[in-house]
Amino acid sequence: MAATLQTAASVFGEGKLKVGSISIGPLHGSPPRPPKPLLIISPSEGGEYPVVLFFHGFEIKNFDYTVLFRHIASHGFVVVAPQLYVLLEESETEVKDAGEVADWLVHNLEPVLPVGVKPNLLKVALAGHSRGGHTAFSLALNLARNPTHQIFNFSALVGVDPVAGQSKSDQIKPEILDFKPGSFDLGGAPVMVIGSGLGDESIAFPFPPCAPEGVSHKEFYYECRPTCCHFVVEEYGHMDMLDDGAEKALSCVCKHGKTREPMRRSVGGLTVAFLKAYFEGMKGYLVAIVDGADTIAPARLNPAVLREE
């Protein structure tokens, strides 16, 4: 499907569907309850929709991405965002918990959705920001250490400024980066990696960069095999996809852009275009964005690369 710059740009705005939010936790609702609290943003209109399972970043709340989630859901996706931890937790435990949430979705997501809304569990994207990006990749690499995890399948993977540690010699566990091209074995699933142009810059001494060079988006993309794409939102930082005012204490240690809206809409639109390409066969949006990266997105994208076999 071909797409003009104008039609492709539509993914960077709100979609046509009305959406609603659902909060459900281990202490709420009827059994079987989810292993972790969930924020679900779903279309309100009946239909069958692909699922995006999104993992939050380090010490960030799942609801701090609400504007981004509503953007994605309004284009026809069910977004499920677990709160994996509140205080610092071992990253390996986080990955195990992510696997348990993924497995819970298989039989238990549809009953908690609005009447008439059906999740398409043959089209599930794993996604995550920062350390949550590491979690998404770890789950995709089948490192959840969960014996029931084999029943869950994913169809696409999105890393939003993923981070795997402080440096090449100081990775969080499980250590998934081995610094070799194409080393990720993701079963042929398409992958999109979105980076922030300011993420590898320190806001001031003595604060380290929030997305250090060597263990962030460039390396994740380097280790992906086709089909994969890589976009960097040039003038924005590691926390700029969050809601306005969210996580101020953490945001102040990360270099950031002037306002968050262009970054949020860029991340949301790229995610929608990518998932439309590989879930719905509507690749024209993604190709048009790659070809018109200087003009089509709310923020400048450089690089904007799509690699296919």
Image: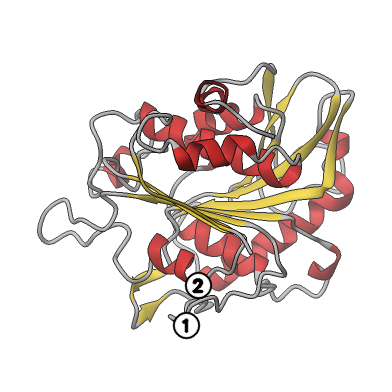
Mark in the foreground, 1 or 2:
2
Q: Is residue 267 left or right of residue 112?
A: left
**Amino acid marked by disc 1:** Asp
Question: Residue 35 falls in which quadrant of the image?
Answer: bottom right
Q: Is mark 2 on a helix, strand or loop?
A: loop
**Amino acid marked by disc 2:** Glu
Q: In which quarter of the image is the C terminus?
A: bottom right
For the point 35% across and 38% down, which residue is it? 240
CB-based contact (under 8 Å), mark 1 and mark 2: yes
Question: How many C-alpha atoms fall within 10 Å of the one at disc 2: few (<14), some, or many (≥20)?
Answer: some
Image position of 226 with respect to 26: above or below:
below
Image position of 53 with respect to 75: above or below:
below
For the point 47% across and 82% down, which residue is it? 178
Q: Which of marks 1 and 2 is nearer the N terminus?
A: 1
Q: Say which residue label 2 marks.
A: 223
Q: Say which residue label 1 marks.
A: 178
Q: Nearer the viewer, residue 86 or 21?
A: 21
Does residue 27 appear in this view? no
For the point 84% across and 42% down, which residue is it? 120
